[in-house]
Image (spheres, rainbow, N blue to C red):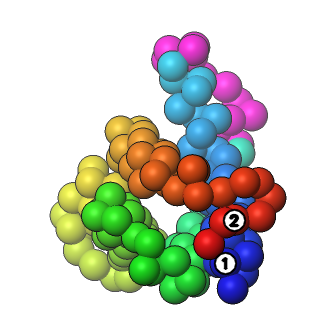
């Protein structure tokens, strides 16, 4: 059962990486190249939206399945991460797939689609999984 749970975690991580490839490249471009514009990056951003939305919704679904298998081991940082990710997914769905007022969508954009929210997510992800590293000898967990 633990291997199935770990597999869902791997699926979630893979979907997250694919869905946020543009976000990651764009963030790195801002860090290393400042305000320089890249045509290929703009073109990628224009065509990446559906991959981003569907990928993140799918990744969140896989995270919930991952949690289903490891709920008894979850600590408070894991639950903060789940709530944080749920908020970001909720904001994304509201922004893209609803007819919510523009003012509400702008508030959601500011509270979900920023580089610091992406960075906070990555930091929470790493911190929430650090306590579980001693439990594992890769590729098989010790449960």
What's drawn in magenta, residue-wise?
Answer: 32-43
Q: What residue is shown at x 56% (from left), y 83% (from top)? A: 69
Distance Cα–Cα, label 2 vs label 1:
7 Å
Using the image as rendered, state which of residue 130 and residue 40 is in the foreground. 130
User: Is residue 42 shown in magenta?
Assistant: yes
Q: What residue is shown at x 59% (from left), y 24% (from top)? A: 29
Q: Are marks 2 and 1 in contact (CB under 8 Å)?
A: yes
Total number of numbered labels? 2
Percent coordinates x, y for residue 9 in the rendering: 64, 68
Residue farthest front in this picture: 142
- For disc 2, the neighbor class at 10 Å (few under 14, some 14 to 19, many from 20) is some
Residue 54 numbered mark, or none: none
Q: Which quadrant would residue 53 be assigned to in this image? A: bottom right
Q: What residue is shown at x 23% (from left), y 74% (from top)? A: 101
Q: Which residue is mark 1?
A: 2
The answer to whether residue 138 is above or below residue 98 is above
Residue 23 seen by the camera? yes
Percent coordinates x, y for residue 36 in the rendering: 57, 16
Earlier-in-chain disc, 2 versus 1: 1
Q: Which residue is mark 2?
A: 141
């Amino acid at each position: 059962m633990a291997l199935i749970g770990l597999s869902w975690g791997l699926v979630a991580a893979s979907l997250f990486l694919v869905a946020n490839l543009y976000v990651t490249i764009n963030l790195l471009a801002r860090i290393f190249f400042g305000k320089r514009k890249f045509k290929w990056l703009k073109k990628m951003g224009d065509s990446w939206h559906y991959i981003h939305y569907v990928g993140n919704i799918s990744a969140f679904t896989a995270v919930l399945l991952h949690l289903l298998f490891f709920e008894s081991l979850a600590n408070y940082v894991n639950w903060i991460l789940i709530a944080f990710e749920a908020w970001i997914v909720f904001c994304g769905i509201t922004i893209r797939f609803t007819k919510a007022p523009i003012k509400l969508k702008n508030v959601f954009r500011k509270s979900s689609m920023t580089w610091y929210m992406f960075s906070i997510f990555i930091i929470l992800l790493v911190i929430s999984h650090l306590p579980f590293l001693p439990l594992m000898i890769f590729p098989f967990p010790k449960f």
